[in-house]
Image: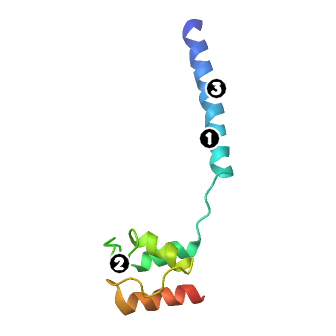
Amino acid sequence: MSTILLPVAVLGSLGLIFGIGLSLASKAFEVKIDPRIEAIKKCLPGVNCGACGYPGCEGLASAIVEEKASIDGCKVGGKPVAEKIKNIMEG
């Protein structure tokens, strides 16, 4: 019986230690994302067509927040999307 319990206890405790270590590492190395990027990404049509010149809608949203692209960069969304993005960026 002890031939089974010892390996189970060792593996269980190792799993617990590694799990705690991974949890702490995920908090220490967390990448903070500007909430405006997520809000703008939700406003964009999400077709990832590349007509704006960026690799998908998330690329355009990041460029808008970093002020590397204009708010009317989405050709597919047009003026309604630009108005929503303008409201997000202003306030």
Label 2's element?
loop
Name the residue that disc number 2 marks.
45
For disc 3, the neighbor class at 10 Å (few under 14, some 14 to 19, many from 20) is few
Name the residue that disc number 1 marks.
22
The Cα atoms of the two marked residues, 3 and 2, are separated by: 48 Å
Q: Is residue 66 left or right of residue 81?
A: right
Relative depth, front residue between 22 and 31: 31
Name the spot of residue 74 as percent of width and height, x first: 38, 82
The Cα atoms of the two marked residues, 1 and 3, are separated by: 14 Å
Residue in the picture at 54% in, 11% down: 4
> Given this view, does label 1 or label 3 mark the residue nearer the observer?
1
Where, by quadrant of the figure, is residue 18 drawn?
top right
Label 1's element?
helix
What's the amino acid at mark 3? Ser
Name the spot of residue 26 as percent of width and height, x first: 62, 48
Name the spot of residue 29 as percent of width and height, x first: 65, 51
The Cα atoms of the two marked residues, 1 and 2, are separated by: 36 Å
Name the residue that disc number 3 marks.
13
Relative depth, front residue between 80 and 17: 80
Mark closer to the chain start, 3 or 2: 3
Mark closer to the chain start, 1 or 2: 1
For disc 2, the neighbor class at 10 Å (few under 14, some 14 to 19, many from 20) is some
Residue in the picture at 35% in, 85% down: 77
Residue in the picture at 45% in, 92% down: 83
Mark closer to the chain start, 1 or 3: 3
User: Total label count?
Assistant: 3
Label 3's element?
helix
- Could you tell me which quadrant the C terminus lies in? bottom right
Q: Is residue 59 left or right of residue 23?
A: left
Q: Is residue 84 above or below residue 38?
A: below
